[in-house]
C-alpha cells in the first residue's frame, strides 16, 4: 500500500512539473501577466486579522463643545500610547567583539628513596650487582598544559519595523511586538521585534530606537530555498547531536 502511494505521488509530481514546463513554454516571447485584482477576503486561506484593541469608551458630547470624547484633536499628541496603537521601531545593530585568551600551566615533581642497613644488605643480595640499593625507588612526573582561544565577531543590521502596542503595564510602560515578512522570489525574510518601552522614549515622529527597548527580543532570519540549501540535512544534524567525536 505504501509503495502504491509513493508511485502515485511521484506520478502527480511529474504531471505538475510537465504542466509547469508547458506553461513556461507557452509564455516564451511574452511579458509576464499581472495578477487580476480580486477580493482578498474571498481568497483561499484568508483569515481575518485579530489584534488587541483598547476598551471602547462611550461617546459623549459636552454642552457648548465642538469635540466629542475620544476624538483626535489637532493639537493632541499623536504618539502611540494605547493598546492597538502602532509605532515604528528603528533597529540598529552594530556589534563588534574581539576576545583572545591564552593559558599555560606546568608542573614537575621528582621523588626518590633508598634502603640501607639490614634491609639494604638483604635487598642488595637479591638484586643484580650493578643496581645500587641506595636509590632503589625513583619516581618522577611532569604535566604541561597550554590553551589558546580567540573570538572575532562583527554584526551589522539597520532597518525599521512597525510594532503594535499589545499591553499597557500598571506603571505606564508599553509592551510592543512587531512582525515583518518580505518575500522575494522563493525566499522569505522574517523580522521580529518585541519588548518593553517607556512612553517618554517615543520620539515626536512616533519612532523609537531599538537600544531603548527593555527585554528586547529581536530576530532576523529567513526561510525558503536559499536558507534550505544553507542548512545541513536532517540526518547530518542527528549525527552531529549523537556522535561523541
Image (spheres, rainbow, N blue to C red):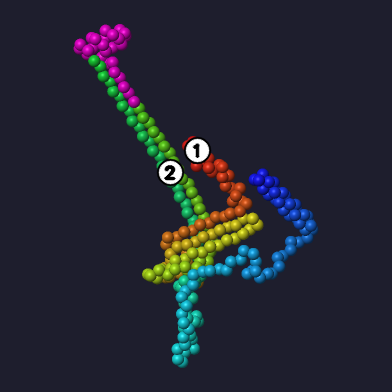
Residue 3, given in percent of the width and then of the height, sits at 67, 44
Q: Which residue is mark 2?
A: 100
Q: CA distance from mark 2 to mark 1?
A: 29 Å
Horizontally, is 26 left or right of 229 in the view?
Answer: right
Q: Which mark is residue 243?
A: 1
Q: Which mark is residue 191?
A: none
Query: Looking at the image, is mark 2 or mark 1 earlier in the sequence?
Result: 2
**6 falls in the magenta region:** no
Q: Residue 134: name its quadrant.
A: top left
Residue name at image x 76 percent, y 61 percent: 31
Q: Is residue 244 above or below residue 227?
A: above
Question: Do we see residue 100 in this rendering?
Answer: yes
Residue 122, given in percent of the width and then of the height, sits at 24, 9
Q: Is residue 113 above or below residue 51?
A: above
Which residue appears farthest toward the front when viewing the image?
Answer: 1
Q: Secondary structure at mark 1?
A: loop
Query: What is the magenta range?
Result: 116-141
Question: Do we see residue 87 in this rendering?
Answer: no
Q: Is residue 77 above or below residue 139?
A: below
In the image, 64 versus 132, the foreground residue is 64
Neighbours of disc 2 within 10 Å: few (<14), some (14-19), many (20+): few
Which residue appears farthest toward the left when viewing the image?
Answer: 117
Residue name at image x 56 percent, y 42 percent: 235
Neighbours of disc 1 within 10 Å: few (<14), some (14-19), many (20+): few
In the image, 181 versus 136, the foreground residue is 181
Residue name at image x 77 percent, y 58 percent: 27
Amino acid at each position: 500500500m505504501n509503495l502504491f502511494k509513493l508511485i502515485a505521488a511521484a506520478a502527480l509530481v511529474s504531471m505538475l512539473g510537465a504542466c509547469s514546463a508547458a506553461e513556461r513554454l507557452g509564455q516564451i516571447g511574452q511579458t509576464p501577466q499581472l495578477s487580476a485584482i480580486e477580493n482578498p477576503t474571498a481568497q483561499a486561506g484568508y483569515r481575518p486579522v485579530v489584534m488587541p484593541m483598547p476598551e471602547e469608551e462611550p461617546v459623549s458630547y459636552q454642552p457648548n463643545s465642538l469635540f466629542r470624547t475620544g476624538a483626535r484633536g489637532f493639537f493632541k499628541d499623536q504618539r502611540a500610547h494605547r493598546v492597538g496603537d502602532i509605532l515604528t521601531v528603528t533597529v540598529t545593530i552594530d556589534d563588534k567583539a574581539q576576545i583572545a585568551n591564552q593559558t599555560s600551566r606546568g608542573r614537575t615533581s621528582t621523588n626518590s628513596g633508598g634502603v640501607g642497613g639490614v634491609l639494604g644488605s638483604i635487598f642488595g643480595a637479591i638484586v643484580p650487582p650493578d643496581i645500587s640499593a641506595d636509590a632503589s625507588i625513583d619516581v618522577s612526573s611532569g604535566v604541561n598544559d597550554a590553551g589558546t582561544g580567540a573570538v572575532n565577531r562583527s554584526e551589522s543590521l539597520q532597518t525599521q519595523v512597525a510594532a503594535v502596542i499589545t499591553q499597557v503595564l500598571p506603571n505606564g510602560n508599553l509592551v510592543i511586538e512587531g512582525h515583518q515578512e518580505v518575500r522575494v522570489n522563493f525566499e522569505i525574510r522574517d523580522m521580529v521585534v518585541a519588548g518593553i518601552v517607556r512612553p517618554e522614549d517615543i520620539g515626536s515622529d512616533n519612532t523609537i530606537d531599538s537600544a531603548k527597548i527593555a527585554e528586547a527580543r529581536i530576530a532576523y532570519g529567513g526561510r525558503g530555498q536559499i536558507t534550505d540549501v544553507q542548512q545541513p540535512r536532517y540526518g547530518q544534524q542527528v549525527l552531529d547531536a549523537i556522535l561523541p567525536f
